[in-house]
Amino acid sequence: MSTARRGHPPHENGVNGDRDDEREEEGDEGEEEEEEVEEEPRLKYQRLGGSVPAILSTDAAAAIAVADRMVALGTHNGTLHILDFQGNQVKEIAAHTTTINDISFDVDGEYIGSCSDDGTVAISSLFTDEKLKFEYHRPMKAIALDPNYSRNYRRFATGGLAGQVLVLTKKTWGGGYNKKVLRDGEGPIHSMKWRTDLLAWANDAGVKVHDMKTDKGIAFIERPKGIPRPEFLVPHLVWQDDTVLVIGWGTSVKIAAIRTDLSHGLNGIQRTITTASSEKYVDIVGSFQTGYHISGIAPFGDLLVVLAYIPDKDDREKKFSTSVPSRQGTAQRPEIHLVSWKNDELTTDALPIHGYEHYKAKDYALVHAPFSGSSNAGGQWVAGDEPLYYIVSPKDIVVAKPRDAEDHIAWLLQHGWHEKALAAVEAGQGRTELLDEVGSRYLDHLIIERKYAEAAQLCPKLLRGSPSAWERWVFHFAHLRQLPVLVPYIPTENPQLSDTAYEVALVALTTNPSFHELLLTTVKIWPPTLYTASPVISAIEPQLNSSSMTDPLKEALAELYVVNGQYEKAFSLYAELLKPEVFEFIEKYNLHDAIHDKVVNLMILDSKRAVHLLIQHRDIIPPYEIVEQLLHTSKNCDKKYLLHLYLHALFETDIHAGKDFHDMQVELYADYEPRMLLPFLRTSQHYRLDKAYEIFAQKELVMEQVFVLGRMGNAKEALSTIINKLEAIDKAVEFVMEQHDEELWEELIRQCLQKPEMVGMLLEHTVGNLDPLYIVSLVPDGLEIPRLRDRLVKIVTDYRTETSLRNGCNDILKADCVNLLVKYYHEARRGVYMASMDEEVHGNRVDDGSSRGSERSSSVRALDIKSRTRCGARCCLCFDPLPIQDVSVIVFYCCHAYHLSCLEGGLELMKSNINQDSDNGSDDDGGSPLGESSMRCVLCTTAAA
């Protein structure tokens, strides 16, 4: 047998009860008890209400039967109460005068039969006035209506203390009933059940099964040995289906299967019962003993439901006798055992029946609702067709039925298995409304267990889209001061909560530095339309100068300032935090006026972008203010380098903008960028030469010293510095050339003559500047100059090359000049015709295509020349203004301009004069210039002639 867990009996109101702790395990007191594994009950219990409490308050229940549509309750005063399934009385039948022992319905639930200790059997129609009553003068203990009672000649079977099994059938003619005795002389009949064509009854000898169709006995099953007489432990018969009979008697359970062939029994049990018919026989397919008395038995699918009566401990230590236990008022609670055919117990539930202490085993009864149609084939139930079980005691009726999904979920919650309960609901078990209840109880459980983080993580799944539920839990977490763990899961849409809920959440994150990172993340993620920033800002601002202020909190405050439109305050915090995006922030919100006191922060953050910003807006932030901040900052940075970067960029942008700081800039260049010194020194005029020279001398910047000495007018010292420190003749020569001082050349030669190597180097660099022969003539006799021969050869070669190049260049230059002059002369003699507006219009109508382009080009040229005409835009002959209507103008490249009529008259006059000269014998050695062109400048031609 498997270990059974004692279940929970029902409360007075019908809800599940508590565990029966009264039973004790058998065995020695020193033996350690094994911890029982708690299993979920299979059944749930509820007291039958309605009219039942009132009925049993004045009477006692004696028998019960269940049909498809109603329940029949028989009492000790002989009354039949027809009830609905809620216990409400539908009909009352005064059938007998004393205790009703058995009740039977037909399969249609239209007729009901009952028998009583008064010796009567009553059969009544539930829907008509038809009633029958039979007198037998001996107590009748069992009755069974033919399942097809109304269609099968009103047949029924009954039996009692007389020991006869009577079958009565209504006569076809003449009225009355035919009575037939199926069995006699084997003791009182204690129980009787009819299913299809099979009638089973139990007497003192055992259980017999009779085939009513063939009127033949099928099997006889002996009464279990060692059990009390049937009047103390009544045998219980129940048909599980049309071919399986379950027998519970005393402490024995047998399952008998009706067969129609000679095969072996189920479960490997051989057929052991001799049958009276070769057509049908019985196999005992299951059999076991119990440790309790059986007060009722019923099928439960492929399991059995057993109503157990627990005898007293003293009685259990004795063997069963033929008498009932003598002790009264000490009985234990009856129990419902759910067992398999092999007696494997699945669950055990103790029932707190009213007055159970005084009841005996035979005072209880267990019946179940009949199977409906084919849905119960094999004892299995389809969904929605689960059976009902009625546990009857004299003063109480309890209804048991299989637990459903909601019961399963409630049991899981009751035992603290909230996660399993949640999984069951999510799997679709039970109503969807259960998710809210299960979720709420699960969260409550986690809160009690102080598992706040786990509870917060489950909120999205459990609260789903309910704004009210979310807000309720937000405020509950806030009350517990655990709201920060819930903040990451608070929804911002679907559903959207009230702005107060979001503000409470944000304020809660400001209270502890460990939450500041989460606050920053939340402020960045949550849309600003969800909340008002002012309450959160008010919660943060008092912490600005306290030890609890952290960088994340500052950044979160800056984000809230942005939400609130306080951009300058936001910028101040961004600059303090050295946020890279501060530059875009300045441009986006035009905060250039706000950067006055944040220069150092911006330079530390990104000097390149900061310098560009400061120079671009130097009208707003003057250079002296920036220099002052950088010089006196207490921040940990290389302030001189930052100052150098700014002043250098400022100098490149405007050489005069930072003139007041050029002395400082000389030192900064010397420290950080010496290569930029010379360009700076050459360009700037705003630094002190003596101070600059001191700096260069300290840092041994020779070229810079030379430049400053040159600026100071001390050229000889500068030249000496180049020669003695740099020993660079090329630079010395370059320096002397820049000074344009002949005496420096002499000084250069003089100083070089002191070093033979210098003389040789000087010879190499004097070509084009000094006469090498002059230098050689000054060399003292006996002075050994390294590589003198090679250098002289090179000097001569270079000189010849230079001379040749100069001559060639001169020739080319002269030829170019002649060619250009000739070309200019010819071009200058050509005139440019400028037509009047009427002529231009006429020309445009006649000409098109390329001619139009030529006129445009000529017009452009004419206008160009006109802008440079001499004589003040007047004709050079008549001196009238050139723009006269309908008069064309001619302009020559010599910039002389004429009216066309004036020019033609002047040319005619010149021709006549020339002709006169020719007649006088003048020679024409190359033709007259007038012969070259019909249009010539009169003034230039006259001057040439």
Image (cartoon, rainbow, N blue to C red):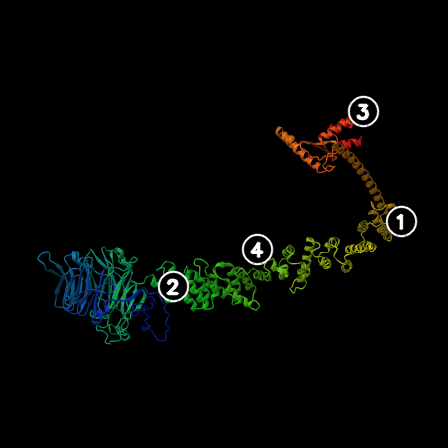
Q: Amino acid at mark 3?
A: Gln
Residue farthest along the left direction in this orientation: 174
Taking depth in this image into account, of 187 and 487 the one nearest to the observer is: 487
Give the structural element (helix, strand or loop) at label 3. helix
Q: Earlier in the sequence, mark 4 or mark 3?
A: 4
- The answer to whether residue 187 is seen in the rendering is no
Q: Earlier in the sequence, mark 3 or mark 1?
A: 1
User: Alpha carbon of mark 4 to alpha carbon of mark 1: how far?
Assistant: 74 Å
**Badges 4 and 2: C-beta atoms under 8 Å apart?**
no
Q: Amino acid at mark 1?
A: Leu
Q: Earlier in the sequence, mark 1 or mark 2?
A: 2
Foreground mark, 4 or 1, reads 4
Taking depth in this image into account, of 62 and 610 the one nearest to the observer is: 610
Image coordinates of residue 153 in percent, x first then y, are: 14, 57
**Badges 1 and 2: C-beta atoms under 8 Å apart?**
no
Q: Earlier in the sequence, mark 4 or mark 1?
A: 4
Give the structural element (helix, strand or loop) at label 2. helix
Give the structural element (helix, strand or loop) at label 4. helix
- Name the image quarter holding the N terminus: bottom left
Q: Earlier in the sequence, mark 4 or mark 2?
A: 2
Quadrant hosting residue 324: bottom left
Quadrant hosting residue 868: top right
Image coordinates of residue 731 in percent, x first then y, are: 79, 51
Give the structural element (helix, strand or loop) at label 1. helix
The residue pinned by badge 1 equals 778
The residue pinned by badge 3 equals 916
Q: Amino acid at mark 4?
A: Lys
Tag of residue 588: 4
The residue pinned by badge 2 equals 438
